[in-house]
Image (spheres, grey):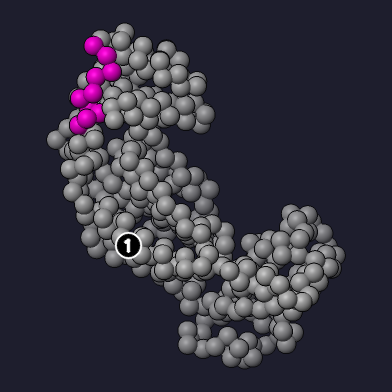
Amino acid sequence: MATLIKASNEWATRPADQRFKSLADLHSAVTDRRDRSRTATVAVSELRAKVVDGTVYLNGRADRTAALTHWSFGQLSRFAGAPPSYLRQLPAPLAAECLNTGLVKYQGEGEDSTAKLLLSVPVVSSSQALSQVVESLDSPPPLTLRGMTSDRYSRIWDADITSRLIRLAEHGWQPAPAAFDGSRGLYASAHDMFAFMVDNDRRIFERGPGGGLSRGFFAWNSEVGAASFGIMTFLYEYVCGNHRVWGASNVSEVRIRHVGDADERAFSQMAVELRKYADSSAADDELKIQRAGSYQLGANKDEVLDAVFGLKVPGLTRARIVEAYQLAEEHSDWYGNPRSAWGLAGGLTEIARDLPHADERVTLDRAAGKVMEMAF
């Protein structure tokens, strides 16, 4: 058992304009963003920083300029070999001079002499070429550079991910239960996206203590190189109003870097794994839980305490184990036999839920996982 805080961190840090109440809203937003995006592969040596009205822009071929986002400015800075945090403190002309000094090193041919640009354009037909759009705009054109990556980068569109999430929603999956502020675990910014999905209609082990477990997963991505494509699947007991996931087990994570055939592999992996995860028989999972529920850590309380303390989990005191045992005993209708691996692990997880410090929670979550491992 463990406590997953990835979704809770998203909930705690995302501003209001990055939160979405439904998959349809999230999909619409990232689809519109994709439709207004164009890609170009260019020689880095052809790029220069240019100051327009006191702001640093990216200047390319034919003297066309593009505004920089906070994220793309950082990427451009890294291409130039300069720390973006320092450049942001400089006057625009000096920052541009530093960037251009660094970009000079890309003269000539080499493995990193070209870059992939992701540009955002005004609302136009998705069939319209970037060159047509640029030529039709006044100067300075309202282009925005969203991302600048190496030419080895393989882009995975957020909209392609959300379209698959919508298909899963047609088969029982749904966004996370509403948090304290009503948000549903669906987020997207100019440089990434995150989705927290659950399948509450097919709970497993409902005939056992605690009313069963639900399946859940996190999916995240970045179109501009901010993060790999990733999926984390798990079983869980319940979700708090801050989207902290309690009593998580069978946690599995897959990450795919945006390199080479990442797009094809990502979607095939996502489709296969999630379909298998959602539609497979619950027999194996129930068998594991039954085994943990029937595995006795000791014949009495003292033997249980000795066995768990003997795991020597750093930071786990005997007093905490006693507290966990007492909680498991008080809530045996929920956790089952307090002497079982399932029961004591549940007691440890319940204590962790209310601890104010993250390091203490991690210690007890780790201990709960070690106890569960004893059953297998």
Task: Identify the residue at horizontal 47%, vertical 30% (top origin).
Answer: 362
In this view, the residue in front, 296 or 224, is 296
Disc 1 secondary structure class: helix
Q: Quadrant of residue 195?
A: bottom left
362 left or right of 96 in image: left
- Kind of residue at badge 1: Ala
Range of residues picked out in magenta: 290-299
In this view, the residue in front, 288 or 220, is 288
Q: Is residue 6 above or below residue 99?
A: above
Extreme-front residue of the structure: 110
Q: Residues within 10 Å of mark 1 (few under 14, many from 20)?
A: some
69 left or right of 312 in image: right
Visible residue check, residue 24: no
Task: Report x, y in % for residue 299.
Answer: 23, 11
Task: Identify the residue at horizontal 36%, vertical 11% (top origin).
Answer: 306
Number of disc labels: 1
Quadrant of the frame with the C terminus: top left
Quadrant of the frame with the N terminus: top left
Task: Identify the residue at horizontal 37%, vertical 17% (top origin).
Answer: 308
Task: Report x, y in % for residue 189.
Answer: 52, 61
160 left or right of 85 in image: left
Q: Quadrant of residue 344?
A: top left
Task: Report x, y in % for residue 340.
Answer: 25, 21
Visible residue check, residue 295: yes
- Which residue is label 1 attached to? 271
